[in-house]
Amino acid sequence: MSDKSITNTSESGGIDPREDTRSPERYLRPAVDIIEKEDCLSIIADLPGVGKENLDLGIDKGILTIQGQVKPEVKGTEVYREFDLLSYYRQFQLPEAIDQEKVEAEYVNGVLTLRLCKAEAAKPRKIEVQVG
Amino acid sequence: MASWDMFRELDNLRREIDEAFRGVGLRRVQAPYFLTGSGTRRFPLVNISEDEAGVYVEALVPGVDPSAVELSVLRNTLTLSGERGPAEADRNNVWHRNERGSGKFSRTIELPAEIDSGKVSAQCRDGVLTITLPKAEAAKPKKISVSVS
């Protein structure tokens, strides 16, 4: 990870993975990719089985929460099982350089793509040197 | 027994043990990951269930174009293959996390019954592919009434 990166390693470190709620449900951490481009940060998360209507995204006090409810249905009797579809939950601490008003989200084929734009002040700028 | 396959017997034993412990609450949650790139698991992950009429297979294919998934059925085997492209083609961007895998996948699974391959249907919703495979007539249970003479 380079010095110029906008996130740091303790990015989700300080946030409790929902231990304190004592909720009876179990939660899964979705796998994510985080890619930084010049003007925005992309967060791509795999949320298979979540319907669009059960997907809940929110930003509160600089913390982005991705939450998805899954209602699995099994037809017939179970013969073999390799994966469980439970609800998803994951939080990210957003850096201050992100403009929290400009967030775009797209959900296609079980993959959520979030585009978080950087605030104008945080974008890289080239300064031309004038030769006097 | 016409043919005795040790691996199949072991597989059956494992399934029976799984069955015995189901519902006890000790079972570990199996995370729905796709193409992790490490480990020996085969992808896509599948759940199989059955009833008298057919076999139902659920496969986990998030981020895969449903029309690009290839399915083929032969007697009692099902083959699933396809590809998931990388999240971002340009590797020059700064990657802070890369937990989602990408690449080609192919998997053949043995189903618990012979399938009528002409009536197979598949539906993809939110990254979960649900395949309905009706059993072949010969594999369906039949009731025979006993006549009292």
Image (cartoon, coloured by chain):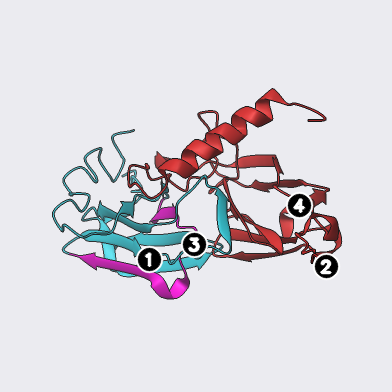
Mark 2, other Cα within 10 Å: few <14 / some 14–19 / many ≥20: few
Task: Work out how far the residue at label 2 is from the one at label 3, CA to CA, in angstroms.
Answer: 50 Å
Q: Indicate left or right for B22 with B112 as reference.
A: left
What chain does mark 4 sit on?
B
Q: Which chain is red?
A: B
Badge count: 4
Q: Which chain is cyan?
A: A
Task: Work out how far the residue at label 4 is from the one at label 3, CA to CA, in angstroms.
Answer: 20 Å
The label on residue B147 is: 2
Query: What residue is shown with label 3?
Result: A49
The label on residue A69 is: 1
Q: Indicate left or right for B136 with B41 as reference.
A: right
Mark 3 residue element: loop
Q: Nearer the viewer, mark 2 or mark 1?
A: 2
A40 is within the stretch colored magenta: yes
As shown in the figure, which amino acid type bears the numbered disc 2?
Ser
Query: What residue is shown with label 4?
Result: B70
A71 is within the stretch colored magenta: no
Where's the C terminus of chain B, which quadrant?
bottom right
Q: Residue B74: image x %, image y %?
A: 84, 47
Task: Work out how far the residue at label 3 is from the one at label 1, CA to CA, in angstroms.
Answer: 9 Å
Q: Residue A9: image x %, image y %?
A: 25, 37
Q: Nearer the viewer, residue A5 or B70?
A: B70
* Residues rendered magenta in the picture: A38-60
